[in-house]
Image (spheres, grey):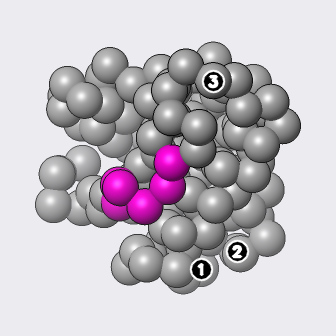
Amino acid sequence: MGKTDMQQFSGFLTDRGSKYAVSGGPVSSRADVKAFLKTLTRDKRYAKATHNTWAAILPDEGGTKGDDGEAGAGMVILRMLEREGVTGHIIVVTRWFGGTKLGGDRYRRVQDAVQHYLENATLKGDAC
């Protein structure tokens, strides 16, 4: 996974002090997912984020996800990927906690971030 394959969007979404970013790129295996996350968190800003929740639908293995402490957020991303028919692509929603708990709104912000990615990224997965 090269840094050039990674697409990142930040500065488009904040809620009560929490700041969000969304990143993604092509993946075809669990090893690709692990490499993508490792590349992302080499950036100290992302390594220090409160949450890096993610999901991907792998061509031969199906859906996989990670909540990174934001319970249920990976499933939100996975459902959106399924609905859009996006396979072979990982989407990571990063949150830097701003001091105010968002309750159920945190899932809406995850959806907003994924939607932003889907509308602005160049998708290179199987079904894209």
Q: Residues within 10 Å of mark 1 (few under 14, many from 20)?
A: few
Q: Report if residue 42 is visible in the image.
A: yes
Q: Are marks 2 and 1 in contact (CB under 8 Å)?
A: yes
Q: Main secondary structure of the magenta part?
A: strand
In the picture provided, is 113 more to the left or to the right than 5?
right
Q: Residue pushed farthest right?
A: 104
> Percent x, y for residue 119?
52, 80
- Quarter of the rendering occupied by the C terminus: bottom right
Residue type pointed to by label 2: Gly
Residue depicted at 51% across the width and 48% down the height: 14
Q: Quadrant of residue 45?
A: top left
> Percent x, y for residue 31?
40, 35
Residue type pointed to by label 3: Thr
Q: Give the extent of the magenta segment.
A: 9-14
Residue depicted at 50% across the width and 35% down the height: 17
Q: Which residue is mark 2?
A: 85
> Percent x, y for residue 113?
56, 57
107 to 52, vertically: above or below? below
Q: Which residue is mark 1?
A: 127
Q: Report if residue 62 is visible in the image.
A: no
In the picture provided, is 66 more to the left or to the right than 37?
right
**Mark 1 or 3, which is nearer the eye?**
3
Q: Which residue is mark 3?
A: 100
Residue depicted at 73% across the width and 62% down the height: 80
Q: Earlier in the sequence, mark 1 or mark 3?
A: 3
In the picture provided, is 127 more to the left or to the right than 108?
left
Which label is found at residue 37? Answer: none
Q: Earlier in the sequence, mark 2 or mark 1?
A: 2
**Mark 2 or 3, which is nearer the eye?**
3
Decide whether residue 12 is among the magenta residues. yes
Give the CA distance from mark 2 to mark 3. 34 Å
